[in-house]
Every structure is written in C-alpha cells, then in structure tokens.
Amino acid sequence: MFMQRGKHFSHTRTINLVVVLATVFSIYLLWISNINVIAKWVAALIALSVSSEAIMYLNQFKGYFIFYMLATRKMFLKFIDNISKKHKKFWLFFAEWGLAVGFGALAYYMFKKRIGKKTIATSLLTIFVLIYVMLPYSALALNLINIPNMNTQLAAQASSSTPATEMLTTVIYMAASIIGGLATLIYILIVYGAAHVLYTLAMFAHSVQVGAPNTKILSTQIAYVYPVIPGIDMPLIAGIIALVIVLVVHEFSHGILARIAKIRLKSIGLLMFGLIPVGAFVEPDEKEVMKKNSMVQDRILAAGISANILVTIILFVVLIPLLFVLPSFMSTRVVVTGTVAGAPAHVVPLNAQIITWNNYKVDNISDAEKAAATDKPGGVVTLGTSAGNFTLIANSTGKIGIYVEQISTPVQGSFSSGAINFAYEVVVLAFILNLLVAMVNLLPIPGFDGWRIYELEIKNKKLVTAATALILISLMISVLPIFWQY
C-alpha cells in the first residue's frame, strides 16, 4: 500500500533542483570511476535511494519504501480514452497479435482457437524477422555505444562461439520461438544459462576435489543475467529516455485495451527510483476486470507486450540508416576490458588500446574479430597496444583469453556528431529494452503479465507454480558469475 510522507517546504523547487543535480553528479562520478563494478552498483543504489527519499519527502509524493509515484495526470486518461474510441478492430488485432508472438503456434490452442489463423500466421512471420533479421544486429548496434559490462559479456560470449555453434543456436532459437513464441525462447535462455553456470561450478568443484583447483573455469563463465543502471552501466540521459519510452508505450497500451473493454481507469503515472523510472502504471478497476471473460483479460495483459514488440520493429527501421551514418561522425577505438586468469593474454593491461593484431590495423570491433580469426592453436599472436607490444602463444583452441570492447566517441568540436550520437544511443537502448521488456514480461513470475495469462489459461496450477519456481531459481543462479568475476 502506498503511503504519503513529508511536509511542504517554501523553497521546494530550489531544493528539488539541488537534489537532482547532486544525484546526477554522483552518478556521473561513478560512471567515470574505475572502482569495482559491484561497488559502483551499491554506491549508485545508495545515491538513488537517498534521492528518492528526499524527492518524496519534499513533494509529498505517494510512495512505498524507496519508490515514489510521479504526477498522475487526468489529461493522459483523456488521451487514452480518445485513442480507444478509434480503430477498435485494429487494437483488438494488435492485442491478439501480441499474444500470438508471445506464445507462437501454441497460442492457437492455448487460447482455445479464439485467435484467428491469419493473426497466428502474421505473428510467426514477426517471430522470424525478430530472430533471423533483427537480433543479429543487436550486438553490432550495442558495440557503438558505451555499455561496458554488457559489451564485455557479449564479447566473452562471442569469443567462445564458432560459426557452426552460432548456426545451430539460431536454428534452436527459431524452432523454440515458432512453436512456443518469445515466452518459450526467454524461458529456455534463462534455464540454459543457469544450467551452464551449474555445470561450470561442478567442473570447478571437481578440480578442487582432485587437488588441482582450476580458477580459469570460473573466470571464463559469463553471467547470463546482467543488471543495468542508467549512469552506471549505460548513458544516463539516453538510458532514462529509453526507459520512459518502454514503460509509457507498455502501460498506455494496457489502458487502451481496458477502455475498449469499458473498464474504468483510476490513475496513470510513472513509478520512480531516484531519477530512474522503474515502472509505469495505468490502474484499471480490478473488480471490473475480473468480471470480464478470460480472452478480454488476456488482450489487456498482452497489449503492453504487443506495444513493446511493435516499437522494437519501428526502432529497428530507424536504426538501420543510423548504423550506416554514425561511423562518419564517430571516433572509435578497441580497448582491453578483461583477460582470463592464467591465459596467454593475462599480461596485457586493462584499458590498453589495441592498435594492431597480427599486424592487422584495428580501428573497430570488426577489425579485431577478423584479426582474431587468423589465430591458430599454438601459434604466435602479436598485439600492438598503447601499453606496448606483446608476443603471445595461443592455446590449444587458438584463443589468447582476452575480452575487448569498442569505445565510440563523437568527433571533437562537432555539434552534429554529438547530436547524432545521442539520438543513436536513445534509439539503440530503446530498441534493446523494448524487446527485453516484452520477453521478460512473458515469464511466469508473479506481477508480470505472463504470469497472469498463465493463471487464466492453464488449469493445472501446480504446473504454473513449478514453472515459476524453476525460472526464479534459474535467474538467481544465472547472475552468480557477476560476484566471482569482480
């Protein structure tokens, strides 16, 4: 339940500005610092918590613990009302399309054939485009902005894969998504990640048992679940704008389908943690919702997922031309973000810029990948870096155990390059976050849209409970490598 705190201050606006600027400054200092990643998160959470409490106290905002509700506006409720009165057939198709993308071919049976075959066919085509066309661009798009921890994870994952495994992975992803939609895909990804972490722990435990502890096994294991905080793991302003886009389109769509079903909306707004939007809400009258049949409720629940998927597709269309235009406005370099303990490259300093690799000039991440592809098992690898030259011997798999990241910055003195870079950051982050939020919301986790859909459509409650338990345990296991890597 939300509580009301605080009292009125005569200089509230001035104090609010001081709190906001102090929070931004503290987050900026953490962003540029070289302290431990976990220490950054802890410090950021403390700064944001203090900011939340101060803003809630100063403005008498409703809130709970360290979260507060930001300005509910009646004008937005009227806006939702006006939209819901137009193109009703489109909105109904829109919601059912989201259900079908979420649950794939199984949606036809899961929702008792209440979703038309044409809608199912459209959704399967959408899934194909998402997996085969759009996802391959996501890693490339992320490499052009500074998201240090996420990019390090992507680089680590890429370094351990081969063309054959990538092809097999794509086929598996595609098959799982066509059959069970994005809900099945995200479920498989998280459970697989947890299984891989457990396997790594078992291998390490075995090495300890035989008297030869192999810490290299742990250091090469990536975290399959990785938290990101604007200002710490990704650009602050662009990250906040991207989050607002994600949350607003998600919740507004819930509201539109609720109004089409003649359900009253009580309020609308953003749930904030400091300066970071962590949620949005369109609060329908729950008693009216419960009176509706399951398909009406499903449409309302799926509308947010539909909106995030549609925005992902729209942003992808915007992203493609930016990918071609951006490099001419950017200066890029490739730096070392990590090395595997005991691996040949462990002597290379962190943050050193890689200038050449096997005499190939390295200007971007693609150059580094092409150069690394020439490494042979047991062969000599030469690195020219800003910290000096290194001659290494690749291991039996042709790897030297190094993680790299592309750092991109606007051309100095150019306003247009800075503006284009900022627009690009917003588009990429919104593109990635919309897709992630759509997929994660399909999980059978209490409070998520997917969980309520499962509750409505699956009679076997023990099965839903077991699926929920498995995914929650898998999430906790998947995040463990973060703690032993830092």
Image (cartoon, rainbow, N blue to C red):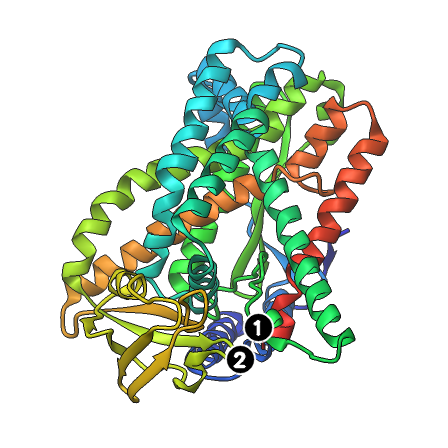
Q: In this view, does 141 lie to the left or right of 72?
A: left
- Callout 1 crowding tier (Cα within 10 Å): few <14, some 14–19, many ≥20: some
Which residue is located at x 54 percent, y 38 percent? 251
Question: What is the C-alpha distance between the residues marked 1 and 2?
Answer: 7 Å
Front residue (pair 474, 249)? 474
Q: Position of residue 147 (x, y in %)?
A: 41, 65
From the top left corner, tell me how far across and down residue 311 is, in percent: 40, 37
Determine whether 230 is above or below 167 in the image.
Answer: below
Horizontal and vertical percent position of residue 333? 25, 72
Name the amino acid, label 2.
Ala
Q: Residue at x 46, y 47 (%)?
A: 165
Q: What element carries label 2?
A: loop
Q: Which residue is drawn at 55% across and 63% down?
A: 222
Of residue 66 and residue 170, the one placed in the foreground of this image is: 170
Q: Where is residue 133 in the image (x, y as percent from the top left)?
A: 35, 36
Judged left or right of residue 249, residue 187 is right
Above or below residue 398? Residue 344 is below
Q: What element carries label 1?
A: helix
**For mark 2, does the 10 Å Cα neighbourhood hold few (<14), some (14 to 19), or many (20 or more) residues?**
some
Q: Is residue 85 left or right of residue 461?
A: left
Q: Can residue 63 be spotted in the picture?
A: no
Residue holding disc 1: 219
The first of marks 1 and 2 along the sequence is 1
Q: Which of 338 and 138 is in front in this view?
A: 338
Residue 242 position (above or below residue 419) = above
Specify the quadrant that holds the C terminus.
bottom right
For disc 2, the marked residue is 341
Residue at 45% x, 66% y: name it: 152
Q: Which amino acid does label 1 sit on?
A: Ser
Image position of 408 with respect to 323: above or below:
below
Please report contact status of discs 1 and 2: CB closer than 8 Å, yes or no: yes
